[in-house]
Image (cartoon, rainbow, N blue to C red):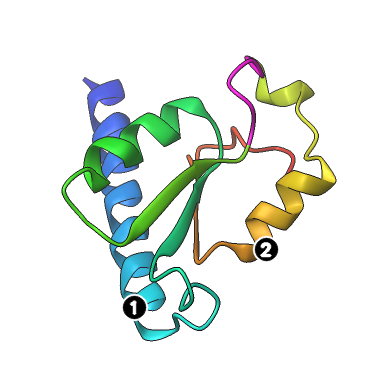
Amino acid sequence: MKKKWVVLLLMLGVILLIGVGVSLAAGNGKRREAQGQALAVASFQPVYLAAQELLQDISGIQLLRLSENQAGCLHDYEPTPEDLKRLYKSNVFIINGGGMESFL
């Protein structure tokens, strides 16, 4: 029963982060003004898949994944310079928040 609450709270946190990020991206679209899209970056595959489901009907948002799909264990992951550039250009960074992203 406790696990269900934790999962529910994490999903609500992701939804809240996406909502805040989208509103911030809409208000400060200078970096993405040329492409007309806000850029959201998800930290790893499960977060990417959840965000993809939530954003599928919203236009004007490009979703990318920070870590590569083959990076199965985030404890061994280290961001590359390309990852950091992608993160710098993003309007929103979506994370799990449960301590999975130790590289942060």
Let me know if residue 45 is in the magenta part: no
Q: Between residue 102 and residue 78, name the one nearer to us.
A: 78
Residue 92 on image: x %, y %: 48, 61
Query: Which residue is tagged 1?
Result: 26
Relative placement, left or right, of 40 versus 69 is left
Say which residue appears at 34% left-offset and 41% top-offset.
51
Q: Amino acid at mark 2?
A: Tyr
Report the predominant secondary structure element of the magenta stretch: loop
Q: What is the span of residues highlighted in magenta in the rendered image?
A: 67-72
* Residue at 44%, 80% in the rendered image: 29
Residue 49, given in percent of the width and then of the height, sits at: 36, 30
- Image quadrant in which the N terminus is located: top left
Image position of 62 (left or right of 53): right
Q: Is residue 51 left or right of residue 59?
A: right
How many numbered badges does the structure rendering display? 2
Question: Which residue is label 2 attached to?
Answer: 88
Q: Residue furthest left?
A: 57
Q: Secondary structure at mark 1?
A: helix
Q: Earlier in the sequence, mark 2 or mark 1?
A: 1
Was residue 70 drawn as part of the magenta stretch in this picture? yes
Task: Name the spot of residue 16 as percent of width and height, x first.
Answer: 29, 58
Of 100 and 91, the residue lying toward us: 91
**Alpha carbons under labels 2 and 1: distance apart:** 17 Å
Would residue 79 be visible to someone looking at this image?
yes
